[in-house]
Amino acid sequence: QVQLVESGGGLVQAGGSLRLSCAGSGRSLSSNSMGWFRQAPGKEREFVAAISWNGARTYSTDSVKGRFTISRDNAKNTVYLQMNSLKPEDTAVYYCAADSLRFGNLVVTTSRYNYWGQGTQVTVTS
């Protein structure tokens, strides 16, 4: 059984930075695309960024392009989300997820991801 554990969230002022980590256990995730999603209070969970199984391809939603960077270290079974120039509207619970398919394409929909972490809170103050 795969388990994902996020860490690195916290309280930061606008313009600041945070680095989220997502550590996987149970089996290697080196053949799975990974994604980051977020959910703000009263809103649906939304896609933030995804990375292919080998890290060669990434994709992020327009609102975070140029500010957030997704990366992975397959040797550590860990995915990262570097968040710079944070804005109050980035406040949400951030979740990492593993694609259900191995060697699949990047996907932005939640339905393709079958393993989820418990989330980590990111709060950006103005």
Image (spheres, rainbow, N blue to C red):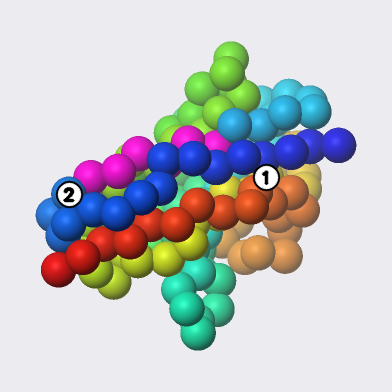
Q: Observer-nearest residue: 34 or 118?
A: 118
Name the kind of residue labelled 1 in the image: Ala
Looking at the rendering, the stretch of residues picked out in magenta corresponds to: 17-22
Q: Which mark is residue 98?
A: 1
Spot the residue most to the bottom. 42
**Viewer-nearest residue: 71 or 115:** 115
Return the x and y of residue 122 as percentages of the image width and height: 38, 57
**Camera-nearest residue between 1 and 126:** 126
- Mark 1 or 2 closer to N-term? 2
**Amino acid at dot 2:** Gly
Q: In this view, does 21 lie to the left or right of 107?
A: left
Residue at the right extreme, as displayed:
1
As drawn, 102 above or below 105:
above
Query: Can you tell which mark lies on residue 16?
Result: 2
Whole-angstrom CA distance, mark 1 to mark 2, is 27 Å
Cβ–Cβ below 8 Å for labels 1 and 2? no
**Relative to 42, 70 lies left or right:** left
Query: Is the residue marked by circle 2 packed among few (<14), some (14-19), or many (20+) residues within 10 Å?
Result: some
Assess disc 1: are there few (<14), some (14-19) or many (≥20) residues with their C-alpha within 10 Å of its C-alpha: many
Q: Residue at x 66, y 26 (%)?
A: 30
